[in-house]
């Protein structure tokens, strides 16, 4: 969670949930850009969605693999 600085928000007391673009840029710089109209560093959420879907798919594969191993071992 975070709060916007007063110069960037009409409601600086309103709590937000999500990523802080400056921190996000350190992890995934290709998915951030500087929005000239707003004069702010911004996250390209369409790239984030693809990464999240890929991560869920990888986790599903791992769970399926573990379930198969447990079934072969007779674990319930």
Image (cartoon, grey):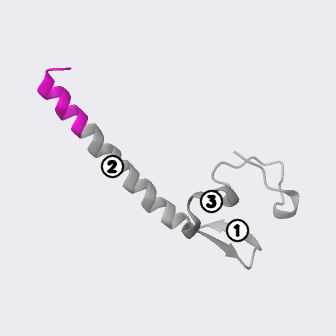
Q: Mark 3 points at which residue?
A: 26
The stretch in magenta equals: 65-76
In the image, residue 71 above or below residue 21: above
Tags 2 and 3 touching, CB below 8 Å: no
Against 75, residue 3 (above or below) is below
Query: From the image, which quarter does the C terminus lie in?
Result: top left
Residue 58's disc number = 2
Q: Is residue 51 magenta?
A: no
**Magenta stretch contains residue 74:** yes
In this rendering, position of residue 50 left or right of residue 27: left
Q: Secondary structure of the magenta portion, mostly?
A: helix
Q: Earlier in the sequence, mark 2 or mark 3?
A: 3
Q: Quarter of the image holding residue 1?
A: top right
Residue 75 image offset from top left, x and y in percent: 19, 20
Q: Is label 3 or label 1 in front?
A: 3
Kind of element beneath mark 3: helix
Q: What element carries label 1?
A: strand
- Which of marks 1 and 2 precedes in the sequence? 1
Task: Answer few, some or many: residues within 10 Å of disc 2's Cα (few below 14, many 20 plus, some between 14 and 19).
Answer: few
**Residue plotted at (47% across, 60% down):** 49
Q: Residues within 10 Å of mark 1 (few under 14, many from 20)?
A: some
Residue 54 percent across, percent down from the top left: 37, 56
Taking the image as shown, residue 5 lies to the left or right of residue 62, namely right
**Residue pushed farthest front?**
26
Question: Along the horizontal axis of the image, is 38 left or right of 59?
Answer: right
The image shows residue 20 at horizontal and vertical percentages of 68, 55
Residue nearer the viewer, 14 or 28: 28
Q: Looking at the image, which residue is at 15% across and 27% down?
A: 71
């Amino acid at each position: 969670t975070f709060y916007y600085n007063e110069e960037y928000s009409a409601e600086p007391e309103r709590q937000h949930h999500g990523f802080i673009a400056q921190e996000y840029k350190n992890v995934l710089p290709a998915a951030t850009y500087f929005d000239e109209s707003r004069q702010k560093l911004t996250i390209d959420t369409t790239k984030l969605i693809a990464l999240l879907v890929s991560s869920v798919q990888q986790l599903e594969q791992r769970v399926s693999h573990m379930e198969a191993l447990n079934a072969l071992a007779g674990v319930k």
